[in-house]
Image (spheres, helix red, strand yellow):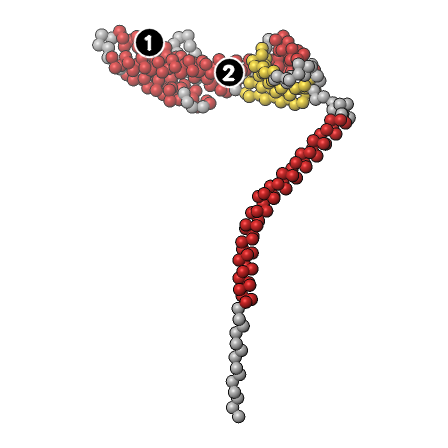
């Protein structure tokens, strides 16, 4: 019963620590395994697996000697013949063991025009510099170049350590499940708890395995993104297709349009603007004139007689 409680507590502790970052997760898992070993008298990883602590540190140092770096690069290029340049880029990539992950060739109106293209390549990391040099030498102009490197060594080491501990925990849980099943009075609730812990640990193992596989893939194969555009054509000083007749025809067309515009304005003014002005200004003007004339025709007031002075 004590062993069951310890194993279940160990599973819950690892599940809680699985979301932590960096070396703290590994240290917590190592401490939990050490306590479980002392209480049960068994090794956490079995006879063939390395124990947590010194063995894990040795593995970490060995992995740290080979850095895990994700490399990404970007090139903006110009070429006189973009179709031929695209073929050369693909040939250089495939010769280095890489492949085309994505490619887009933009359509052109004239079949004689050179299309622009965007292409994403996956190239072995140790071949990236050589392939980039070959691509830059195969075109007329390199407009821009950029490279980035992301060191994920610590993340990879942490995932490896967590995976080792989770696999050891799964072995212990399966052994415990077998032991509980063999008991004559096996408790169904206890079996269910152990089975649920095994399922949870297995899910975490598969998740970490997927993360490790993804990291190994992006580390082994660098990503190179290329934007390829045709070289801009030189614009001549004078246009060889000048046609005076077309220019005169355009001028006459503009003159007719101008005269029509003036005529339209005059018609609009005479039939709409002028009547509106007469209505808006004529009525107030007539009222004002009428009032003014009535005011002019009124009789003048009688003068006031002076007061007689006292003698």
Residue 37 seen in render: no
* Distance between mark 2 and mark 1 Cα atoms: 32 Å
Residue 156 seen in render: yes
Image side of residue 136 versus residue 72, left or right: right
Q: What is the quadrant of residue 80 in the picture?
A: top right
For label 2, count other residues whose C-alpha is less than 10 Å away and answer few (under 14), some (14-19) or many (20+): some
Q: Residue at x 30, y 10 (%)?
A: 177
> Which residue has dot 1 on it?
175
Residue 269: x %, y % from top left? 61, 43
Q: Secondary structure at mark 2?
A: helix
> Which residue has dot 2 on it?
215
Q: What is the quadrant of residue 106 in the picture?
A: top right
Report the residue that reaches farthest toward the left.
Answer: 185
Tell which tag, 2 or 1, sits nearer the viewer.
Answer: 2
The answer to whether the residue labelled 2 contacts the one labelled 1, judged by CB atoms less than 8 Å apart, is no
Of residues 237 and 290, the one nearer the viewer is 290
Q: Is residue 144 above or below residue 170?
A: below
Residue 13: x %, y % from top left? 36, 21
Residue 224: x %, y % from top left? 60, 17
Q: Residue at x 71, y 30 (%)?
A: 250
Residue 63: x %, y % from top left? 52, 15
Image side of residue 236 versus residue 23, left or right: right
For the N terminus, the image quarter is top left
Q: Secondary structure at mark 1?
A: helix
Of residues 100 and 147, the one nearer the viewer is 100
Of residues 64 and 94, the one nearer the viewer is 94
For label 1, count other residues whose C-alpha is less than 10 Å away and answer few (under 14), some (14-19) or many (20+): few
């Amino acid at each position: 019963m004590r062993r069951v409680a310890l194993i279940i507590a160990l599973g819950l502790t690892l599940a809680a620590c699985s979301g932590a970052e960096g070396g703290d997760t590994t240290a917590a898992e190592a401490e939990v395994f050490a306590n479980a070993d002392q209480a049960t008298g068994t090794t956490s990883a079995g006879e063939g697996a390395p124990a947590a602590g010194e063995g894990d540190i040795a593995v970490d140092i060995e992995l740290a000697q080979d850095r895990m770096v994700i490399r990404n690069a970007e090139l903006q290029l110009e070429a006189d013949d973009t179709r031929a340049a695209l073929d050369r880029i693909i040939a250089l990539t495939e010769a280095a063991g890489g492949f085309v992950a994505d490619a887009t060739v933009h359509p052109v109106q004239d079949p004689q025009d050179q299309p622009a293209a965007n292409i994403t390549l996956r190239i072995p990391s140790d071949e990236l510099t050589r392939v980039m040099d070959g691509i830059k030498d195969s075109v007329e102009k390199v407009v821009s170049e950029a490279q980035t490197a992301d060191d994920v060594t610590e993340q990879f080491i942490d995932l490896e350590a967590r995976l080792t501990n989770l696999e050891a925990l799964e072995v212990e849980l399966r052994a415990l499940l077998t032991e509980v099943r063999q008991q004559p009075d096996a408790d169904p609730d206890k079996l269910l708890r152990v089975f649920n812990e095994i399922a949870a640990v297995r899910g975490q193992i598969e998740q970490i395995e997927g993360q490790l596989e993804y990291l190994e893939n992006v580390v082994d194969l660098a990503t190179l993104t290329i934007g390829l555009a045709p070289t801009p054509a030189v614009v001549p000083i004078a246009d060889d297709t000048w046609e005076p007749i077309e220019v005169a025809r355009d001028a006459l067309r503009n003159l007719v349009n101008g005269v029509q515009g003036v005529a339209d304005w005059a018609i609009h003014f005479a039939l709409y603007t002028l009547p509106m002005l007469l209505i808006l200004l004529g009525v107030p003007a007539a009222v004002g004139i009428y009032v003014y004339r009535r005011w002019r025709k009124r009789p003048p007031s009688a003068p006031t007689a002076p007061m007689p002075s006292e003698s």
